[in-house]
Amino acid sequence: MYTAEELSKVLKVLGDPTRLTMLKQMEAGEQCACSFVDCFDISQPAISRHLKMLRQAGLLLERRDKQWIHYRLNETSPFYGIVVDLLDKIETIDVSCDCDTECAI
Amino acid sequence: MYTAEELSKVLKVLGDPTRLTMLKQMEAGEQCACSFVDCFDISQPAISRHLKMLRQAGLLLERRDKQWIHYRLNETSPFYGIVVDLLDKIETIDVSCDCDTECAI
DNA sequence: ACGTTATATAACAATTAGGTTATACAGGAA
DNA sequence: TTCCTGTATAACCTAATTGTTATATAACGT
């Protein structure tokens, strides 16, 4: 159970097509930040800021590996269930934009 | 199944505490617009615009009765299920702000 | 017709959101 | 060290959001 205040905060973060698509991709597994940069038609700093908003909402966890940072859904977030329920209602995106650098390992 | 685009649009509309609370109240049944005016600490035009956004998102239906307009959740919206699922996760609000005019009939 | 009530719209101000470019920082490789 | 790559932050711009007050519209009551 959540208050309308806290739930609306999370929904606001989810209410952006870029962020929602990022989450959808992470549902399939951990994603390197650079793969988002390749995937979306916006600048690297814009991607970085979207990731920051998702992190600050507690929806993401990160793992650093060398210079790459891999993000994944935070399964311990109190909103994880809600997020996954929503993501499962989104058509799978044909990701033709895999990270083309080493990080894809 | 929805696209990330269309779902994010709806989530953006839901991502506001006033609108989310309004929806929560409508989940309990039809609400007169004037009851929202009494209930929230914002001006009548602000309420009116929030209702318009919910209407434009297809989430509400309205019924005019004399000079009062009663709003209710649109059960035929393609997003109705999602909306109800989310509303059910919100703590019930102690509505000490019923419409104090005749419309409450 | 006239006043009153309920709701919607217009015009405006302040804040937030989301993009950009430039720059800083972190880590690996030569 | 120096250079390169990946990521984050700063500064800025524009557009959207959310509130306000003033006004218009719709419907009722006298």
Image (cartoon, coloured by chain):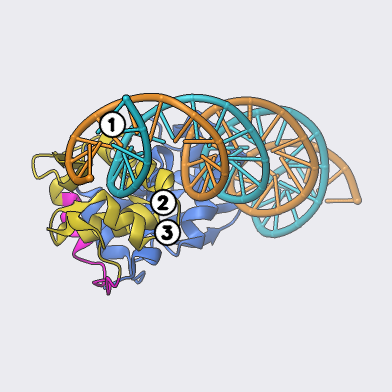
Chain colours: A blue, B yellow, C cyan, D orange
**Is label 3 in a helix, a strand or a loop?**
helix
Q: CA distance from mark 2 to mark 1?
A: 25 Å
Estimate how packed mark 2 is, as few (under 14), some (14 to 19) or many (20 or more) residues with alpha carbons within 10 Å: some
Estimate how packed mark 3 is, as few (under 14), some (14 to 19) or many (20 or more) residues with alpha carbons within 10 Å: some
Q: Amino acid at mark 3?
A: Lys
Decide which of tag 2 and tag 1 comes sooner along the chain. 2
Question: Disc 3 is attached to a residue of which chain?
Answer: A
Q: Residue furthest left?
A: B76
Q: Is residue C21 left or right of residue A72?
A: right
Decide which of tag 1 and tag 3 comes sooner along the chain. 3
Quadrant of the drawing holding the C terminus of chain B: bottom left
Q: CA distance from mark 3 to mark 2?
A: 5 Å
Please tell me which residue is depicted at 39% across the width and 53% down the height of the picture. Answer: B16
Q: Which residue is mark 2?
A: A12
Estimate how packed mark 1 is, as few (under 14), some (14 to 19) or many (20 or more) residues with alpha carbons within 10 Å: few
Total number of numbered labels? 3
Report whether mark 1 lies on the same chain as mark 3.
yes
Q: Would you place residue C10 above or below residue A36 in this image?
A: above
Query: Which is nearer the eye, C6 or A70?
Result: C6
Residue A92 is at least partly visible in this image? no
Q: Amino acid at mark 2?
A: Lys
Instruction: Look at the image and give the residue range highlighted in magenta.
Output: B82-96
Q: Amino acid at mark 1?
A: Asp
Q: Which residue is mark 1?
A: A94
Query: Which is nearer the eye, B37 or A89?
Result: B37
Query: Which is nearer the eye, D19 or A82?
Result: D19
On residue A56, which mark appears?
Answer: none
Report whether mark 2 lies on the same chain as mark 1.
yes
**Is label 1 in a helix, a strand or a loop?**
loop
Quadrant of the drawing holding the N terminus of chain B: top left
Q: Which residue is mark 3?
A: A9
